[in-house]
Amino acid sequence: MSEKQIIKLMEEGTLDEFLDCLDFAPIGVIDLIKRYAVALPLSDYNKRKAIKDKLGYDVDAAIKNEQATKNAEKEAEEATTPTRRVTKPVEQETVAEGPVRRTKPKYTIPNQQ
């Protein structure tokens, strides 16, 4: 079976055809069925139940885990996204010629002669 045939069987095939596939398909096809059951996801409850009964693979739990993983990745991606900080522009004071004192001196300057 090709991958397109497997997808078609999962979406449009009857339950009896699907059960025959699960009973007589090689391991590679079974692995593809498991993968596509989660990726598509498989909407037929009876087919999900058949996979769980025949293969012991819980499609519902796998889909929940897949969603949880996607949500965790999204949250981690949002947390690591850097935020842009904008600073307020510095206002420049007009400067007279030469340095200007900003504070009053604590000592007195004697008059120079």
Image (tube, rainbow, N blue to C red):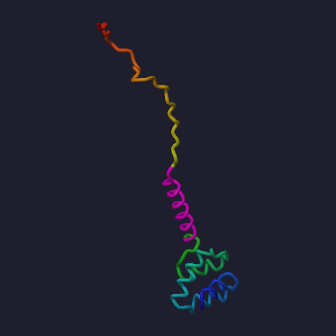
Quarter holding the N terminus?
bottom right
Counting from the top left corner in percent of width and height, residue 108 is at: 32, 9
* 25 on left or right of 43: left
Foreground: 24 or 36? 36
63 to 84, vertically: above or below:
below
* Residue 32, position as x, y percentages in the image: 55, 83
Principal secondary structure, stretch drawn in magenta:
helix
> Which quarter of the image is occupied by the C terminus?
top left
Q: Looking at this view, name the residue that lies furthest to the front.
A: 113
Image quarter for residue 102? top left
State the residue at coordinates (50%, 30%). Answer: 92
Residue at 59%, 71% in the rendered image: 60
Was residue 95 drawn as part of the magenta stretch in this picture?
A: no
Q: Which residues are magenta?
A: 62-82
Front residue of 49/81: it is 81
Q: How many marks?
A: 0
Which of 113/80 is in front?
113
Magenta span includes 81: yes
Residue in front for this viewpoint, 9 or 61: 9
On the image, which quarter does residue 48 sit in?
bottom right
Picture coordinates of residue 6, whole percent (x, y): 62, 86
- Which residue lies at the image location 49% right of the left edge and 27% below the top edge? 93
Residue 81 lies left or right of residue 105; in this view the side is: right
Vertical side of 59 occupied by 110: above or below? above
The image position of residue 20, as x and y in percent, is 62, 90
